[in-house]
Image: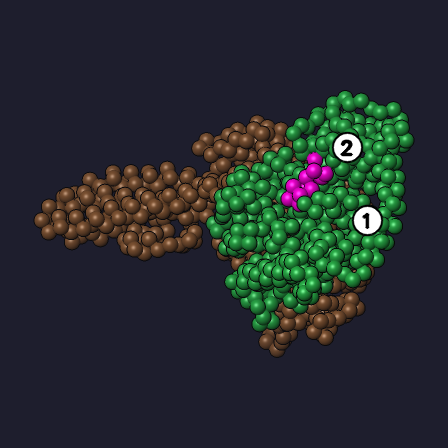
């Protein structure tokens, strides 16, 4: 599990280019002619890294240095097993240290009384296009020159603050309690590219990115853009074929790589040259080798089943669907195949008899794991909790709605060990709300990411002055 | 059924299944009837006349009952979501009456002979049928089962004449929107109108009673900026005639499709009326209309038409025409198109005024008016003349401060009776808008994608405009849950978050909305004489947990 190692790295070391090289084409790294030289360099430099890491890791753990933060007295919805009517959270070194009714408060800790407020985990949007430009104009999320572009990396497109007219997208998202977003390529292409998980702090994409590549974004049944040009795909069959072909090409590439590796191992003297670099195929190898899951944009029931068929055919490590407006027609199949559905931005759909279906609620009750999304900026990123509120209004249990914007997306991305709920040892990403999370009349008072306050409502200081 | 889950609002589905059940029953009864008819024929052959009459009478009564059932299912129910079961009694009594008449018929058959009998049966049953309120074609259907079996898909034939019926709604809390809330109050509805609202009212005899001790009753919500019936679910649009920037002559009623699926959808969220507007890409888009979301033809549905003329300045027309290299491709161009049109309209209005004056003078002096020629009619200028004369409001869609200022200049110059729509940066010029008494339909709140002109949208916009003394209404956000339901209460809740009082926010989607679009005499509050369109909520309307329990539109 190389991926886990990656996400634990310190932000300063996280260089997506090299990461992808490690994950995707690790074999060929070592055959470079300058390998020896690099090794020597690395050996020379590594003690420095070591020192830096110790310094970084050492500082926040020190309980006496005033870096312990305690939030006391709030109602706490943890998204985990136990909630607290009046609880206290101790944050140490950017992690949740303890949580309970009356935990021991270390001496010298900064204690904030938040009695009467509500604390939830930071919200996670499982499907967003944050920082990719306006929907109206030319966006940065669809490379419409080719329907198959798995080689594209979404982090190369993200503006870390937001593009006009959404210049303050990130800031506004944080102010409404969104602390993490899965940012994905658009759905214009059949294979759109590689998604990333961002924590909304740090100022640069590289600082924000906590997981890359997070998954492969695809879209089935969408053919209009290329049909206009008279180019494949002009049918739904065409979209499925393109996925299949890309997977098979990756399989061929894998075979060629393996052949070369074998040859090199067995007959180093006569070893031929490795197969040439092909970023497209290398990217698809991540899917083929089950290193990253697949996330597919679908609308209609037939496309949904095509996605399920492809997932079985190529044994995707995990399949999740976005939008899936007709998923209520095949909910039992999705439950059986353990497909996660990311519901939104349309929360209520109408069946053939024009009766409303609360998609999130219905799928949940059929045993399908759900996440709720904004598809920002189709619905703007700050309105993630209003999206969930609509599902609650029409029947979804509030507890499940909270899970659908916290722990479920974390689990979907394989980050449930550090994100998504308030439990000791997890990242201290949390929000202090003035009241009910789903009541849009209430606001976020304080937002913390990794234990650092990244937003404070003007109301907080106003009340302190009183 | 099971597939839709508890998430959907149950009443619609109830209606559908009820209808299906009735159809099923109808088909079964009809089958029986056909077989009976065959039996009847063989029995005629054996010449046992009395038995034949009995069988046919029974069969007819049964068939008629079944059609009554079909009629019930088919009829667009006044109360959305409630089976219209109250005419059952009436129909049953009609059937009973027929049985009473039967001995007389038998005697008549005996005396007048077989030849005279059949036309009489027909005549009697026709008169009974029409008296009971059955429309003629239904009777034809009775005579021809195949015609009746044809699917009519919810459209009923012919006029349905009904006596006004009484409906009593008892509710935990009634927000009339013109006075303090009434706790444990009563609303009496007669036909399409509200008869009385109050506490401890005498319950009239024979009235149907809806008791919602926990429910909150509000007037039906009004969406003041809607494209219902013009743009369907798949985005097929009838709201933008982009052949030229000024199409004031167009009337939205001519493009309105009453069976737009979205109408049923928005009704389930409590919206009972809407201002249907042309889109924002024409500079002068046409005439808007206020429509009640109940009925099958636009004439049945219209409440106020035309309600005003729709103008739009800003990015919309600039992009639509500028991209084709046509006027207007700038903001100056937008305003110029309007100024030119209004000047022409003013001239046109003057011509007609002069003509009417000379006519009146001729009549007064009792001389022939034959020589006085009327000005040539121009539909475009006719619509705009009404705006220039102040007979119709100008609905001006403008978002950015420069566009709002431009609109204000036009209002001053032509003394327009204006309503501003959008006004995303309205908070920057709230004082200027307030000074002129221009009401504002506020939106968007910033939920959907931003355009260059809604870049600086603020959630506090509505509150700040209200504070400056501007009368405001809130429009639905189609982007909320992506038009999942056009959720006015959630939009109102957002406005409250922005600083607007709760009462004011509710007014902005009911009474103020009605008054701003010119339908304040019929909509927007619960008071005697107004349309009986009301919504029963399960609790506080601004609470996200609250659901619409019932939407009532007349009895």
Residue B179 locus on image (x, y percent): 67, 35
Q: Which residue corresponds to the image point at 66% horizontal and 61% vertical from the top-left?
A: A267
A193 part of magenta stretch: no
What number is the disc on residue B267? Answer: none
Residue B320 locus on image (x, y percent): 69, 68
Q: In front: A323, or B62? A: A323
| Colour applied to chain A | green
Image: A335 above or below B241: above
> Magenta segment, which residues?
A409-421
Numbered label tally: 2
Q: Which residue corresponds to the image point at 46% horizontal and 41% vertical from the top-left?
A: B2
Kindly identify which residue carries mark 2: A96
A418 part of magenta stretch: yes
Q: Which residue corresponds to the image point at 68% horizontal and 64% vertical from the top-left?
A: A271
Kindly identify which residue carries mark 1: A13
Mark 2 chain: A
Image quadrant in which you'd find residue A88: top right
Q: In front: B548, or B523? A: B548
């Amino acid at each position: 599990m190389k991926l886990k190692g990656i996400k634990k790295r310190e932000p300063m070391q996280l260089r997506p280019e090299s990461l992808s090289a490690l994950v995707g084409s690790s074999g060929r790294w070592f055959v470079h002619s300058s390998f020896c030289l690099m090794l020597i360099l690395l050996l020379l430099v590594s003690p420095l890294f070591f020192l830096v890491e110790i310094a970084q890791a050492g500082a926040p753990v020190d309980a006496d240095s005033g870096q312990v933060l305690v939030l006391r007295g709030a109602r706490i919805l943890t998204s985990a097993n136990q909630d607290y009517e009046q609880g206290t959270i101790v944050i140490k070194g950017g992690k949740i240290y303890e949580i309970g009714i009356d935990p021991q408060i270390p001496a010298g800790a900064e204690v904030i009384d938040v009695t009467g407020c509500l604390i939830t985990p930071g919200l996670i949007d499982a499907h967003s296009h944050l920082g990719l430009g306006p929907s109206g104009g030319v966006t940065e999320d669809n490379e419409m020159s080719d329907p198959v572009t798995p080689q594209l990396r979404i982090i190369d497109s993200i503006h870390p603050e937001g593009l006009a007219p959404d210049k303050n997208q990130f800031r506004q998202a944080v102010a409404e309690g969104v602390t993490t977003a899965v940012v994905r390529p658009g759905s214009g292409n059949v294979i759109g590219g590689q998604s990333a998980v961002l924590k909304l702090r740090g100022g640069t994409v590289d600082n924000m990115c906590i997981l890359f590549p997070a998954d492969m974004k695809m879209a089935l049944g969408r053919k209009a853009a290329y049909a206009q040009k008279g180019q494949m795909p002009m049918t739904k069959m065409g979209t499925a074929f393109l996925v299949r072909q890309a997977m098979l090409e990756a399989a061929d590439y894998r075979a060629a790589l393996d052949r070369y590796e074998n040859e090199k191992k067995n007959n180093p003297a006569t070893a031929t040259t490795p197969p040439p670099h092909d970023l497209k195929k290398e990217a698809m190898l991540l899917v083929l080798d089950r290193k990253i899951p697949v996330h597919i944009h679908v609308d209609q029931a037939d496309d949904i089943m095509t996605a399920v068929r492809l997932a079985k055919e190529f044994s995707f490590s995990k399949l999740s669907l976005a939008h899936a407006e007709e998923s209520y027609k095949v909910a039992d199949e999705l439950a059986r195949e353990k497909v996660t559905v990311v519901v939104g931005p349309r929360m209520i759909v109408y069946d053939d008899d024009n009766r409303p279906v609360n998609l999130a609620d219905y799928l949940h009750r059929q045993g399908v794991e759900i996440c709720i999304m904004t598809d920002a900026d189709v619905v703007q990123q700050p309105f993630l909790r209003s999206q969930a509120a609509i599902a609650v209004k029409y029947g979804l249990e509030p507890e499940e709605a909270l899970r659908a914007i916290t722990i479920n997306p974390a689990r979907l991305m394989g980050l449930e060990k550090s994100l998504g709920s308030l439990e000791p040892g997890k990242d201290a990403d949390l929000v202090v709300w003035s009241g009910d999370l789903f009541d849009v009349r209430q606001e976020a008072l304080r937002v913390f990411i990794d234990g650092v306050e990244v937003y404070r409502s003007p109301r907080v200081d106003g009340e302190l002055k009183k | 059924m099971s597939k839709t889950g508890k998430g959907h609002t149950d009443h619609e589905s109830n209606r559908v299944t009820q209808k299906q059940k009735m159809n099923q029953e109808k088909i079964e009864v009809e089958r029986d009837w056909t077989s009976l008819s065959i039996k009847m024929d063989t029995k005629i052959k054996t010449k046992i006349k009395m038995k034949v009459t009995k069988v046919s009478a029974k069969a007819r009564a049964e068939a008629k009952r079944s059609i009554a059932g079909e009629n019930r299912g088919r009829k667009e129910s006044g109360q959305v979501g409630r089976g219209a079961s109250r005419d059952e009694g009436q129909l049953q009594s009609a059937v009973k009456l027929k049985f009473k008449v039967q001995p007389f018929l038998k005697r008549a058959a005996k005396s007048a002979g077989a030849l005279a009998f059949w036309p009489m049966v027909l005549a009697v049953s026709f008169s009974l049928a029409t008296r009971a309120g059955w429309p003629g074609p239904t009777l034809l259907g009775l005579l021809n089962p195949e015609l009746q079996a044809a699917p009519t898909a919810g459209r009923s034939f012919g006029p349905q004449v009904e006596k006004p019926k009484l409906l009593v709604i008892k509710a935990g809390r009634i927000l009339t929107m013109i006075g303090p809330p009434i706790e444990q109050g009563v609303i009496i509805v007669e036909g399409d109108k509200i008869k009385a609202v109050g506490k401890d009212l005498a319950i009239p005899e024979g009235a149907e009673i809806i008791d919602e001790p926990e429910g909150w009753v509000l007037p039906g919500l009004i969406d003041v900026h809607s494209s219902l019936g013009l743009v369907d679910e798949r985005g097929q649009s009838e709201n933008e005639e982009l052949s030229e920037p000024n199409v004031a002559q167009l009337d939205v009623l001519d493009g309105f499709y009453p069976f737009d699926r979205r109408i049923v959808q928005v009704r389930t969220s409590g919206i009972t009326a809407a201002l249907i507007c042309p889109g924002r890409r024409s500079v002068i888009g046409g005439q808007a209309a206020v429509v009640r979301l109940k009925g099958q033809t636009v004439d049945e549905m219209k409440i106020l038409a035309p309600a005003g003329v729709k103008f739009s300045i800003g990015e919309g027309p600039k992009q639509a025409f500028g991209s084709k290299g046509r006027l207007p491709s700038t903001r100056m161009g937008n305003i110029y198109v309007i100024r030119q049109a209004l000047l022409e309209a003013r001239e046109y209005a003057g011509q007609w005024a002069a003509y009417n004056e000379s006519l009146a003078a001729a009549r007064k002096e009792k001389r022939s008016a034959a020589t006085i020629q009327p000005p040539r009619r121009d539909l475009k200028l006719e619509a705009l003349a009404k705006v220039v004369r102040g007979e119709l409001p100008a609905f001006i869609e403008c978002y950015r401060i420069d566009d709002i200022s431009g609109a204000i200049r036009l209002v001053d110059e032509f003394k327009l009776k204006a309503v501003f729509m959008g006004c995303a940066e309205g908070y920057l010029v709230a004082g200027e808008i307030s000074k002129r008494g221009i009401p504002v339909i506020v939106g968007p709140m910033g939920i959907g994608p931003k355009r260059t002109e809604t870049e600086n949208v603020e959630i506090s916009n509505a509150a700040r405009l209200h504070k400056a003394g501007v009368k405001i209404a809130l429009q639905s956000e189609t982007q909320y849950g992506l038009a999942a339901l056009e959720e006015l209460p959630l939009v109102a809740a957002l406005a409250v978050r922005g600083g607007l009082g709760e009462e004011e926010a509710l007014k902005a989607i009911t009474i103020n909305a009605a008054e701003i679009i010119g339908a304040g005499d019929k909509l927007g509050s619960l008071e005697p004489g107004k349309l009986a369109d009301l919504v029963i909520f399960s609790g506080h309307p601004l609470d996200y947990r609250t659901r619409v329990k019932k939407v009532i539109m007349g009895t």
